[in-house]
Image (spheres, rainbow, N blue to C red):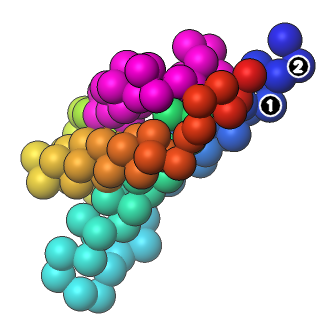
Amino acid sequence: MKKAFIYWLPLVVYSAVIIYLSIDPEPPQADIVGLDKVFHFLAYAVMGALSGRAIASAFGSGADKRRVIVISAFAFSFIFGFLMEVWQSFIPERSAEVLDMIANGAGGLFGAFVFSRFIKKEALR
């Protein structure tokens, strides 16, 4: 139980921070066009890596499980990002953007994939 807490807590805290930033009616604005997509990509790359780490702690981290870890972490990150964009559509001064959803999903996939390349067989057990 304690070990699971160590692996899942960073993901829960990070998700809470993303929620807080996503519901802010006046988020910081990027001065360069398209820079916000880079921020989305990077934020969800971290989420993809953290969710991959948490999922690997539950399923094991053998090389044969990398595909499951990457797909699961990507799915979590993508669905989370999709829901944040939908939620933003109900917040005054915010909007849901398809390009943000794509950046969220791409970042989540990238982070999960990079994490999966660094895990070693039985590394998280």
Image position, residue 47 (x, y; %): 48, 44
Q: Position of residue 58 (x, y in %)?
A: 62, 15
- Report the span colored magenta: 54-80
Cα distance in 3D space between marks 2 and 1: 6 Å
C-beta proximity under 8 Å, tags 2 and 1: yes
- State the residue at coordinates (17%, 81%): 33
Residue at mark 1: 6
Residue 122 placement (x, y as % from top left): 65, 26
Is residue 19 visible from the viewing direction of this image? no
Confirm whether residue 5 shows in the render: yes
Magenta residues, dominant SS class: helix
> Which residue type does callout 2 highlight?
Lys
Which quarter of the image is occupied by the N terminus? top right
How crowded pointer 2 is (Cα within 10 Å; few <14, some 14-19, many 20+) is rated as: few
Is 41 displayed left or right of 66 in the figure? left
Query: Which quadrant of the figure has residue 39?
Result: bottom left
Q: Quadrant of the C terminus?
A: top right
Above or below, comparing residue 16 to residue 103 in the picture = above
Task: Please tell me in which quadrant of the rendered image residue 34 appears.
Answer: bottom left
Q: Is residue 27 above or below residue 4?
A: below
The residue to which callout 2 is attached is 2
Tag 1: amino acid: Ile
Q: Residue at x 56, y 40 (%)?
A: 119
Q: Residue at x 40, y 62 (%)?
A: 42
